[in-house]
């Protein structure tokens, strides 16, 4: 439009410049009659009139172009208003009126997709920020743990105030119960994810807690010592894994659920075979129809016998280590996914040899079976049973592996391995993802029919136990993904060699935050 205006102005200027020049030329050349002069003077006037007419036509065209441009501008403004209204309607809550019915649905879908993608990216960034731990290598390391407070009250005498496993005889002058609180069961975990080696993914980890004892100081009760729990290294292929380190015996993988018992698994010394043991084992997985998997595991373990260390700093061999042969174990398991839940069954076997000196050797063995079966939508039943001999070092009972009819240091004292049977079972009720209720009971029941009279018996442990049982009820509430609360009641039944049964009650409130 500016170009048209400039062209019109140029034409008018040219006409004004040439009109006087034409008139001057016609006047100077007049030498004929008056009629000729008039004729000579009439031609320029007609040209000027024609030029004026052309200018008027050009101006009319310009007016039409200006009107068309104005209409186009108005249409563009209207379209901009429509787009602005659509954007405003998208920013309003879903229940407000005034949204364009035709243009909103696709725009709403696009906006929701963008918001979802942005939230996903933000979550990934936050996850990377949380898991970013500096290490000495270039590979990923993750730090996690649980800060856990346990407030406990007991009635009766127990072996450990924080986490009792047996009921003890009540000594003269002792009170009938206790109240205490502590954070000894807080734990730390380090996980490392290494490179691929021979086609296998490599990983490892360490876990620590503060259940390693107390320093002999006035504030020792609230300054517990750090303790190593587990340490593992794993090579993981598609169907095969090799694990080396210290962890629960691979042939006894299950434990009851309890937030009040994290320093060692619940029902320890009452039917739960759990002691963290140095071991190397291989696992091979076989895919079966109907989303089922069979697992075959075999490995070697250090042969523990529940003997106390002879020295505080220097390690000496136990009866299971003097034989110079590692313990061996095998487990066959089966599991199947069923409505987003897993049914799992397993059976295992364990064998080791023990040398108690003076030619007194023992074959220790155990046979196990374990299960984890969903019962409907909200319930699940899990547990383990075992039968064995001289397996006090695996943590299932409160008694030793063997007993003697005289002093253990005398070569004339005969030895009797302790045969035992036991196990545990737990019923879980989980009506919501944040809430669960657990009821469990466990028992270890040694057979000592071949032993002599109690006064003539010598044992590796200082307070031999005939039978030990425990049961608990707890509620665990996960208020947030990392915030936990729990209340638990536990009952202990311990029977000594005199067949007198002692009982104790333990109530705990636990709260913790995971990180």
Image: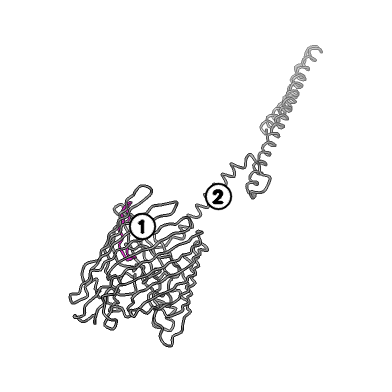
- When asked about the image quadrant of residue 407, the answer is bottom left
Figure quadrant of the N terminus:
top right
Q: Position of residue 350 (x, y in %)?
A: 27, 64
Vertical order, 286 against 439 (above or below): above
Quarter-wise, where is residue 183 in the image? bottom left
In the drawing, what numbered circle is on residue 115?
2
Mark 2: few/some/many CA within 10 Å (<14, 14-19, 20+): few
From the top left corner, tell me how far across and down residue 84 is, in percent: 65, 44
Number of marks present in the image shown: 2
Q: Secondary structure at mark 1?
A: strand
Q: Is residue 240 magenta?
A: yes
Please say if 170 is above or below 16.
below
Q: Is residue 431 left or right of residue 229?
A: right
**Are the two marked residues, 2 and 1, in contact with CB atoms closer than 8 angstroms?**
no
Q: Main structural element of the magenta stretch: helix, strand or loop?
A: strand
Q: In terms of depth relative to the viewer, which is nearer, 430 or 224?
A: 430
Q: Is 319 above or below relative to 20?
A: below
Residue furthest bottom as drawn: 173
Q: Residue furthest right?
A: 34
Q: Which residue occupies 60% across, 42% down?
A: 105
Query: Is residue 170 found inside the magenta-colored segment of the image?
Result: no
How much space separates mark 2 and mark 1, taking CA atoms? 44 Å
Label 1 Cα crowd, 10 Å radius (few <14 / some 14-19 / many 20+)? some
Tell me which residue sits at (77%, 20%) in the image. 45
Determine which residue is flagged by label 1.
Answer: 345
Magenta segment:
236-249
Nearest to the observer: residue 145 or residue 352: 352
- Looking at the picture, the colour scheme in use is one colour
Name the residue nearer the viewer: 134 or 325.
325
The reply, left or right, for residue 387 in relation to residue 474 is: left
Q: Position of residue 440 (x, y in %)?
A: 43, 66
């Amino acid at each position: 439009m500016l170009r048209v205006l400039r062209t019109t102005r140029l034409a008018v200027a040219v006409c004004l410049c040439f009109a006087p020049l034409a008139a001057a030329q016609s006047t100077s050349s007049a030498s004929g009659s008056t009629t000729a002069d008039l004729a000579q003077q009439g031609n320029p006037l007609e040209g000027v009139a024609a030029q004026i007419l052309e200018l008027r036509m050009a101006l009319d065209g310009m007016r039409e172009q200006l009107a068309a441009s104005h209409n186009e501008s108005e249409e563009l403004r209207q379209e901009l208003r429509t787009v602005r209204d659509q954007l405003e309607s998208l920013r309003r809550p879903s229940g407000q009126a005034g949204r364009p019915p035709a243009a909103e649905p696709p725009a709403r879908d696009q906006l929701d997709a963008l918001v979802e993608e942005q939230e996903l990216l933000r979550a990934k960034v936050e996850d990377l920020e949380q898991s970013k731990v500096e290490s000495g290598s270039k590979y990923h390391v993750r730090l996690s743990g649980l800060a856990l407070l346990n407030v406990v009250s007991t009635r009766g005498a127990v072996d450990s105030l924080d986490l009792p496993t047996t009921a003890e005889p009540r000594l003269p002058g002792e009170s009938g119960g206790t109240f205490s609180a502590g954070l000894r069961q807080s734990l730390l975990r380090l996980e490392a994810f290494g490179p691929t080696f021979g086609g296998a993914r490599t990983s490892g980890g360490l876990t620590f807690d503060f259940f390693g004892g107390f320093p002999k100081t006035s504030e020792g009760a609230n300054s517990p010592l750090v303790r190593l729990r587990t340490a593992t290294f794993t090579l993981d292929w598609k169907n095969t894994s090799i694990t080396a380190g210290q962890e629960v015996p691979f042939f006894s993988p299950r434990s009851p659920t309890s937030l009040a018992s994290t320093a060692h698994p619940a029902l320890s010394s009452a039917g739960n075979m759990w002691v963290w043991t140095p071991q190397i084992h291989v696992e091979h997985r076989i895919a079966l129809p109907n989303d089922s998997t069979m697992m075959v595991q075999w490995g070697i373990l250090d042969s523990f016998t529940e003997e106390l260390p002879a020295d505080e700093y220097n390690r000496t061999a136990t009866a299971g280590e003097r034989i110079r042969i590692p313990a061996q174990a095998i487990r066959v398991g089966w599991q199947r996914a069923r409505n987003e839940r897993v049914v799992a069954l397993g059976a295992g076997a364990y064998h080791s040899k023990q040398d108690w000196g003076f030619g007194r050797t023992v074959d220790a063995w155990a046979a196990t079976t374990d299960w984890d079966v969903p019962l409907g939508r909200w319930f699940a039943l899990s547990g383990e049973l075992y039968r064995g001999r001289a397996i006090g070092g695996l943590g299932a009972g409160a008694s030793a592996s063997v007993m003697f009819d005289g002093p253990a240091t005398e070569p004339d004292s005969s030895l009797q391995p302790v045969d035992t049977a036991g196990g545990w079972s737990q019923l879980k009720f989980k009506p919501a993802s944040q809430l669960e209720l657990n009821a469990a009971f466990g028992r270890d029941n040694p057979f000592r029919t071949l032993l002599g009279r109690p006064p003539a018996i010598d044992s590796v442990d200082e307070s031999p136990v005939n039978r030990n049982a425990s049961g608990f009820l707890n509620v665990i509430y996960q208020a947030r993904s990392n915030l936990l609360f729990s209340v638990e009641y536990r009952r202990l039944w311990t029977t000594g060699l005199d067949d007198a049964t002692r009982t104790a009650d333990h109530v705990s409130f636990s709260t913790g935050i995971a990180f």
